[in-house]
Image: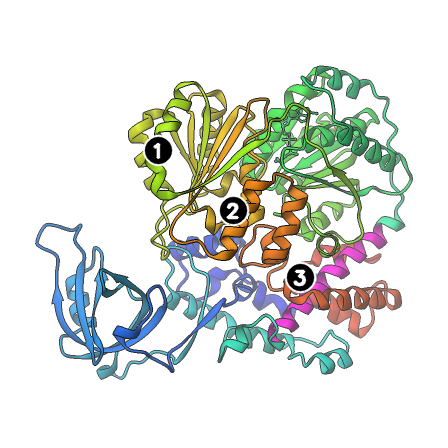
C-alpha cells in the first residue's frame, strides 16, 4: 500500500486547477503518456527545468542575439494589422528602445486583444525568442507580455522547461506552482552521514528548489539539489534490482527442457541459415533456461544483427517444454512487426501467435485473455498491456523484453511481480557500456550478436549539404522508378519554436509533387492503426518513399528498403543516426544513406558525420559517441539523460551510482524486508520513484 502521505503527489494531474480535456492532452504529450489519466502530479514535478532566463541583464533590442530567449523593455510605437481579408499576413506590433526597433509578430491574432495588451506609447516588457531577418529583429508570438504601467512585471529569473506545441511557458509554470503546493513533508531515508557529506537538501526541499533556480549553478547537474534527486533515483533503482534478484534467488526456476521438435521445423523453414553469433546466443540462452536458477540474460546485438530469430528460438523452447512465452515490444508498431515476422514461422510449427496491446479491445480482448489464461495461447506478443493486472498466464516460462532503451527497470519488475517470475531475456539494440548495463539492468548475464548475417553489402554513406536536395530528388526519382524503396527522415512533426526545422508534413507535401501517391507519411502523432496501414503499404510496395520522423528509428524491418535520406543529420546524435541508418542494409541489395546537413557544421557535428561515413560497426560507433557526447546521447535520449531515469544521468552522476549500489546492498543485508524505521522510509522512496513494484518482492508483500 502506498504511504498516504504520498497521495497528493500521486493524484491525477487533472486535479490541479486549469487542466481541462484540451490542456490535459498537452500535458499527456509533454510527459510522454497516452492520456491525461496516466499523468500524476509527481510526473510533472519530475519534468525539471533545462535552463533559466535571467532578466536581471537586458541588453536592449539591437544587442539581443539571434536565436536567444531575451527580455526587452520597450515602448510600443505602432500597430500594423494585416490587410483586410488576408489572414496569411501576420499582425505586427513595433517596439522601440534606446538601441533600436523590433517587430512583434502574431499570426491569426485578434486585433482587439493586441490593442489591449500593447497600447501605443505604453512601455511593456516582452520575452521570447529573438529572430533576426535581413538585419531586422523580430519576435514571433512572445512567451510573455507585461504592461509596466499596469504594475505588471515578469519574474527576474525564470526557469525554462521543455515544452510541447500549444503549451506556453506561462501555463506550464502556473501548473507547476500548483503542483509544488502539494508537496508534503517527506521522511529522510538516507543515512545522515551521507546527507552531510554530500550536502544534500531534503527530498521535498530539493523538489521545490529544482523548480526555482536562482542562477546557472542551480541548473547544473552537479547542484546539490539535482545530485540529491539523482541519488534518490539511483538508490530506488538499485534497491528494486536487488529486490528482484533476492526474489529470484528465493524461488527456484522451472527448468526448461526443450525437445527441439518445434525449433527444428522453424529452423528448416528459415530462408537463411543462422549466423554463428546467433547459434552461440541461442546455446547460452537454452543452457540458462535448463537450469534451476532463473535466467536473467541480456541479448545485445547491433542493428540488423537478427535478434528476433534468437528470441523466437528461446520462445519455442519454452513452448516445447509445455509452457508459454511472451514477447513485449516497446511500441505498437514493433509489436505488430514482431507478429508479422514470428507469426508465420511459428505457424509452420503449428503454433498460433496472439497479439495483445493497448489497442486490443472489447470481445476480442476478452477472448485473448481467456486463451492466455487457459494456456491455449502459447506465444503472445504485445506491449506493456501484456502485464496488466487482468492478464493471467497458465504457465509462463519465458518473457522476452525487447527493450530498445524504451523501458525502465520497473516494467520488468511489473512482469516478475505477476507472481510467476519466468525466465527473462532482455533485448537491446545499441551496444552499451558496462556501467550503463549495471545501472539499467543490474548484474545480468550478457549474450552478444557480434556479426551480421552473411551476404549483407556495406551501406554507402555520403554527406551532403541540404542545398543539393534537387539533385537527390532527381536521383531518387530514378531509383523509385526502378522499384527501390526510400526512407526520408525529418527531425520534427510540426513547426514548433524551432521553426527552422523542416516539418515532416511540409517535406511530404513537397516530395509528393514529384512522387505523387507513391510518397507516404508517418509520424508519432498518427493513431496506431494509421501508422500500421502506412507501414503495410510501404512493406507491400504500394508506396515507395516514406517520409518519417524518428518513429521508425527502432526496430522497423523492411528488408527491401535500400535508400535512406536523413535531413538535418547534424542535429542527431551518433547512436540515433546509427539506429536510423540500420533501417537500410537489411537485405541482400546494396544500400545507401544520404546525410543532409544545413548551415555551417560545428566541429563535433563534423566528427559525428565523419564517423558515420567511415564505419557501420555499432560497437565502434558507441565508443566514439561516448567520447564525443557522453552516455545520455549514446542512447539517443538527448536531454533526458540516462534511460529509465528522470533526473539521474550516468554521465553527470556516475559517482553516485556506485554509492547507491553499495547503500542498497547494505540496507537489504540488514533489513531484507524493509521493516525497520529506515526501511519504512525507503518504501516511501520506492513509491516516489515508481519503483513500487519492487515492494511486492518483499516476503510479506
Ligand atoms: N542469419 C541470418 N541470415 C540472413 N538474414 C537474417 C539472419 N537473421 C536474421 N535475418 C534477417 O535480418 C533482418 C534483421 O533481423 P532483426 O529484425 O531480427 O534484427 P534486429 O537485431 O532486431 O535489428 P534492429 O535492432 O535493427 O531491429 C530481418 O529481415 C531478418 O529476417
Q: Which mark is residue 609?
A: 2
Residue tagged 1: 471
Tell me what residue is drawn at x 75 percent, y 48 percent. Answer: 417
Is disc 2 surrounded by few (<14), some (14 to 19) or many (20+) residues within 10 Å? many
- Disc 3 and disc 2: Cα gap in Å? 25 Å
- Disc 2 and disc 1: Cα gap in Å? 20 Å
Please say if 547 is above or below 407: above
**Which x, y percent locates residue 61?**
26, 74
Question: Magenta span covers which residues?
Answer: 225-247
Q: Which mark is residue 650?
A: 3
**Which x, y percent locates residue 542?**
42, 21
**Which x, y percent locates residue 280?**
81, 32
Callout 3 secondary element:
helix
Q: Which mark is residue 230?
A: none
Q: Is mark 3 within 8 Å of ligand 1?
A: no
Front: mark 3 or 1:
1
Magenta segment main secondary structure: helix
Amino acid at each position: 500500500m502506498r504511504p498516504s502521505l504520498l497521495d497528493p503527489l500521486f493524484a491525477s494531474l487533472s486535479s490541479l486547477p486549469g487542466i481541462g480535456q484540451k490542456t490535459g492532452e498537452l500535458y499527456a504529450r509533454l510527459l510522454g503518456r497516452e492520456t491525461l489519466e496516466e499523468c500524476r502530479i509527481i510526473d510533472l514535478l519530475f519534468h525539471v527545468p533545462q535552463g533559466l532566463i535571467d532578466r536581471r541583464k537586458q541588453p536592449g533590442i539591437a544587442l539581443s542575439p539571434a536565436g536567444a530567449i531575451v527580455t526587452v523593455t520597450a515602448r510600443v510605437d505602432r500597430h500594423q494589422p494585416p490587410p483586410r481579408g488576408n489572414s496569411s499576413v501576420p499582425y505586427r506590433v513595433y517596439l522601440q528602445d534606446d538601441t533600436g526597433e523590433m517587430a512583434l509578430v502574431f499570426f491569426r491574432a485578434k486585433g482587439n486583444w493586441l490593442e489591449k495588451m500593447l497600447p501605443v506609447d505604453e512601455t511593456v516588457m516582452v520575452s521570447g525568442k529573438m529572430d533576426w531577418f535581413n538585419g531586422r529583429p523580430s519576435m514571433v508570438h512572445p512567451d510573455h507580455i507585461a504592461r509596466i504601467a499596469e504594475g505588471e512585471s515578469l519574474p527576474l529569473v525564470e526557469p525554462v522547461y521543455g515544452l510541447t506545441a500549444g503549451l506556453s511557458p506561462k501555463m506550464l509554470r502556473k501548473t507547476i506552482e500548483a503542483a509544488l503546493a502539494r508537496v508534503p513533508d517527506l521522511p529522510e531515508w538516507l543515512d545522515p552521514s551521507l546527507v552531510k557529506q554530500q550536502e544534500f537538501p531534503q527530498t521535498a526541499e530539493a523538489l521545490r528548489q529544482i523548480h526555482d533556480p536562482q542562477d546557472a549553478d542551480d541548473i547544473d547537474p552537479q547542484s546539490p539539489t539535482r545530485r540529491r534527486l539523482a541519488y534518490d533515483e539511483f538508490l530506488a533503482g538499485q534497491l528494486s534490482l536487488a529486490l528482484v534478484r533476492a526474489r529470484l534467488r528465493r524461488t527456484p526456476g522451472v527448468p526448461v527442457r526443450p525437445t527441439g521438435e518445434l525449433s527444428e521445423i522453424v529452423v528448416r523453414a528459415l530462408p537463411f541459415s543462422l549466423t554463428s553469433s546467433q547459434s552461440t546466443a541461442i546455446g547460452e540462452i537454452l543452457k540458462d533456461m535448463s537450469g534451476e536458477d532463473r535466467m536473467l540474460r541480456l541479448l545485445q546485438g547491433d542493428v540488423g544483427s537478427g535478434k528476433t530469430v534468437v528470441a523466437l528460438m528461446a520462445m519455442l523452447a519454452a513452448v516445447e517444454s509445455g509452457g508459454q512465452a511472451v514477447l513485449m515490444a516497446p511500441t505498437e508498431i514493433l509489436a505488430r512487426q514482431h507478429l508479422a515476422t514470428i507469426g508465420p514461422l511459428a505457424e509452420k510449427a503449428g503454433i498460433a501467435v496472439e497479439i495483445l496491446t493497448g489497442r486490443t479491445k472489447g470481445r476480442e480482448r476478452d477472448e485473448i485473455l481467456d486463451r492466455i489464461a487457459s494456456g491455449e495461447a502459447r506465444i503472445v506478443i504485445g506491449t506493456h498491456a501484456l502485464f496488466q493486472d487482468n492478464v493471467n498466464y497458465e504457465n509462463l516460462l519465458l518473457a522476452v523484453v525487447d527493450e530498445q532503451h524504451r523501458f525502465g527497470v520497473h516494467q520488468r519488475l511489473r512482469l516478475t511481480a505477476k507472481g510467476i517470475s519466468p525466465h527473462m531475456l532482455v533485448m537491446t539494440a545499441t551496444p552499451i557500456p558496462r556501467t550503463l548495463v549495471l545501472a539499467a539492468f543490474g548484474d545480468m548475464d550478457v549474450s552478444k550478436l557480434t556479426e551480421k548475417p552473411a551476404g549483407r553489402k556495406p551501406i554507402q554513406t555520403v554527406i551532403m549539404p541540404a542545398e543539393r536536395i534537387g539533385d537527390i530528388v532527381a536521383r531518387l526519382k530514378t531509383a523509385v522508378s526502378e522499384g527501390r524503396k526510400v526512407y526520408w527522415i525529418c527531425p520534427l512533426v510540426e513547426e514548433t519554436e524551432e521553426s527552422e526545422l523542416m516539418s515532416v508534413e511540409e517535406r511530404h507535401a513537397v516530395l509528393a509533387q514529384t512522387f505523387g501517391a507513391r510518397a507516404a507519411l508517418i509520424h508519432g502523432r498518427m493513431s496506431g492503426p494509421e501508422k500500421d496501414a502506412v507501414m503495410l503499404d510501404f512493406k507491400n510496395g504500394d508506396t515507395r518513399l516514406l517520409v518519417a520522423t524518428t518513429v521508425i528509428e527502432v526496430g522497423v524491418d523492411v528488408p527491401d528498403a535500400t535508400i535512406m535520406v536523413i535531413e538535418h543529420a547534424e542535429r542527431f546524435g551518433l547512436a540515433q543516426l546509427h539506429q536510423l541508418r540500420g533501417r537500410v542494409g537489411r537485405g541482400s541489395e546494396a544500400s545507401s544513406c544520404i546525410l543532409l546537413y544545413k548551415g555551417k557544421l560545428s566541429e563535433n557535428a563534423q566528427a559525428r558525420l565523419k564517423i558515420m561515413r567511415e564505419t557501420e560497426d555499432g560497437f565502434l560507433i558507441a565508443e566514439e559517441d561516448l567520447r564525443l557526447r557522453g552516455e545520455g546521447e549514446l542512447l539517443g535520449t538527448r536531454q533526458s539523460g540516462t534511460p529509465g531515469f528522470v533526473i539521474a544521468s550516468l554521465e553527470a552522476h556516475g559517482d553516485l551510482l556506485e554509492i547507491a549500489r553499495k547503500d542498497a546492498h547494505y540496507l537489504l543485508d540488514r533489513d531484507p524486508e524493509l521493516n525497520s524505521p529506515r526501511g519504512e522510509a525507503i518504501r516511501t522512496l520506492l513509491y516516489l520513484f515508481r519503483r513500487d513494484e519492487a515492494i511486492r518482492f518483499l516476503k510479506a508483500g
